[in-house]
Amino acid sequence: MRHGKKFNHLGRTASHRSAMLSNMACSLIEHKRIHTTVAKAKALRVFVEPILTKSKEDSTHNRRVVFSYLQNKEVVSELFRTVAPKIANRNGGYTRIIKTGFRPGDAADTALIELVDFNELYNPNEAEKKTTRRSRRATTKKVEAAPVAEAKVEETEAPVADATEEKTEE
């Protein structure tokens, strides 16, 4: 019986489970989203959210604690440099799980787990900041400049045609 057992063991030993969750957390931080099963995504969310909370305060102690979970220097530096500033004003809920259907081979329920602040589709504020504003005057000047260039091309073509006619007459 599983009375009082709060987390999913995922059919693995404790060492295998911790290694798998560590690797999945590294992949999530590195790629900002991963595809997996729903059970693993839910277990990963419980594993990675406290790590993301630790990364919000950049101190040597927090870096060492996070490294003890992730065991990857590059991912720890990525976490503290790029992910932590984006999630600094968020109080929790750093990840999103989206169910994506069933896997063809074994019909396992699959999901996409992603970092919430790194999805451009759901964050319209980030998309608005990236667009540049253009005035109408710039487009009208370009339109006016185009006929002048065409006229110059026509002028240069006409004398060339006359010169060839003169040579044929002689």
Image (cartoon, rainbow, N blue to C red):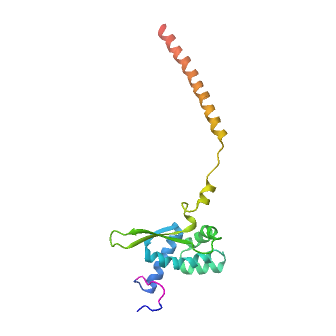
Residue at position x 64%, y 36% in the image? 140
Q: Magenta residues, as a range? A: 5-10
**What residue sits 61% from the left and 77% below the top?**
53
Main SS of residues in magenta: loop
> Does residue 4 appear left or right of residue 125 in this picture?
left
Residue 83: say if magenta.
no
List x then y, in percent, for residue 3: 45, 92
* Picture mark count: 0
Q: Residue at x 64, y 68 (%)?
A: 85
Residue extending furthest left?
A: 105
Indicate whether 131 appears above or below 65. Answer: above
Residue plotted at (45% across, 82% down): 17
Image x and y of residue 119, in percent? 54, 63
Residue 88 lies left or right of residue 23; in this view the side is right
Which of the 4 image quadrants contains residue 83? bottom right
Q: Give the position of the N terminus as an image quadrant.
A: bottom left
Viewer-proximal residue among 141 and 154: 141
Place of residue 31 in the rendered image (x, y in percent of width and height, measured from the top left): 51, 66
